[in-house]
Image: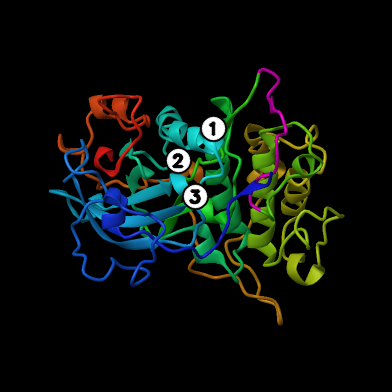
Amino acid sequence: MLQRSCSVDMSTPTVSELRGGNPLRTMASRGSLAEGEEPGQAVFPPGSRLDGKFRILSVVYAHGFDSVVYLADKVGGTEADKCAVKCVFKERMYGEDQVQRAREEAGILHQLAHRRIIAVVAAMETEQAFITVMPYAACGTLHARSQFKTVTEFETRNFTSQALEALEFVHERGYLHGDIKPQNFLLTQAEDKFVVQLCDFGFVERLGDSGKVKYTGMRGTSGYFSPEMVAEQAYGAGVDVFALGCIVFQLLAGYEAFDPPSHFEELDFDPRYWKHMSPECVEFVEQVLDFNPDSRPCAAACFAKPWFAAKVSEEQPVEKFVPPPDPSLKFHHRDHCPDAFPDRSRSDSWMSPADAEKDSFAPPSRANPNEPLSAADA
């Protein structure tokens, strides 16, 4: 079965529906709370450990197949403490395997705590959904910022350095992300440049002793699949590197590396788009988009490639009929990168170590485990 991130415009649950109703009913006004609902109503079940700690403000994202992301305040917090509350709905999942993967995601994110990976503030499971609270990245995603634009080679290299730092850490911990794409890189701004953090570990997989995962179906997003996955072969962390290569190609050139997606042919370095790129840049793109996973460099090895030591100008000539690089898209290099959320509160009311230990999803508790779940249990 194909398992992938979709962009199906399904109805968005209202806040009250998350508390115990049908999560598939239509929202009255997409992008805001439902008609008749006031900001402040929580998606968390009444009386639960997280009830009353967050105040829902609006819908940030509501076009995914199985999830909705809300913007929320932390009660008693500051402007810097705004959160994204991600709700993944059980009724929209393919089966028990996907439910179990969602249940494990928060625990894995705690294991993968790193400056280049979005943190988990809190998490819980209800009858309706898996709910994860994360810091709110006010600058959105790489996709939102770079769609229909190009980025200079200098700034693309800076972005890539941060993205590779995230992948190197994930892979060293024995996991692969499984859904690398522009939508899964969150941006915050510091000193007029972007800080990058990797998010959405819904397709994360544990690498076996061989460093590979058995092929059980297509996983990820079309346009970022690797050749080995398309060939239905066992695959490793190289699928993440290949997907990042697709992103780098598109940031630099403004068009996709493979058209149609996953139609793997020799890369087209059209001189109109690539003549101002350094030879080291072109070589790097060829290497990370190598069709052979055995010769494709791992994330850690990428930093030793000549591109990261090459002299690259911050300025880039503009060509007629070619999309000019967006001058507002500037990224920190990983070696000189500030914190993504330097002003976020660290008060006792935020998240204690004891809370962190609890924040692996667990099914809602019931007095009699043999009885079916009801809305009152949520």
Q: Which residue is mark 3?
A: 92
Amino acid, disc 2: Ile
- State the residue in front, 303 or 110: 110
Amino acid, disc 3: Arg
Residue at the far left in the pictured view: 76
Identify the main secondary structure in magenta: loop
Amino acid, disc 1: Val
Give the SS element for disc 2: loop
Magenta segment: 209-221
The residues tagged by marks 3 and 1 sit, at their Cα atoms, a distance apart of 28 Å
Dot 3 or dot 1, earlier in sequence? 3
The reply to whether dot 1 and dot 2 touch (C-beta < 8 Å) is yes
Give the SS element for disc 3: helix
10 Å crowding of disc 2: few (<14), some (14-19), many (20+): many
* Image mark for residue 170: 1
The residues tagged by marks 1 and 2 sit, at their Cα atoms, a distance apart of 9 Å
Give the SS element for disc 1: helix
Q: Is residue 190 visible?
A: no
Residue at the far right in the pictured view: 266
Q: How many marks?
A: 3
Residue at the far top in the pictured view: 209
Task: State the residue at coordinates (40%, 62%).
Answer: 12
Task: State the residue at coordinates (70%, 36%).
Answer: 238
Q: Quadrant of residue 248?
A: bottom right
**Compared to 47, does 157 lie above or below?**
below
Quarter occupied by the C terminus: top left
Dot 1 or dot 2, earlier in sequence? 2
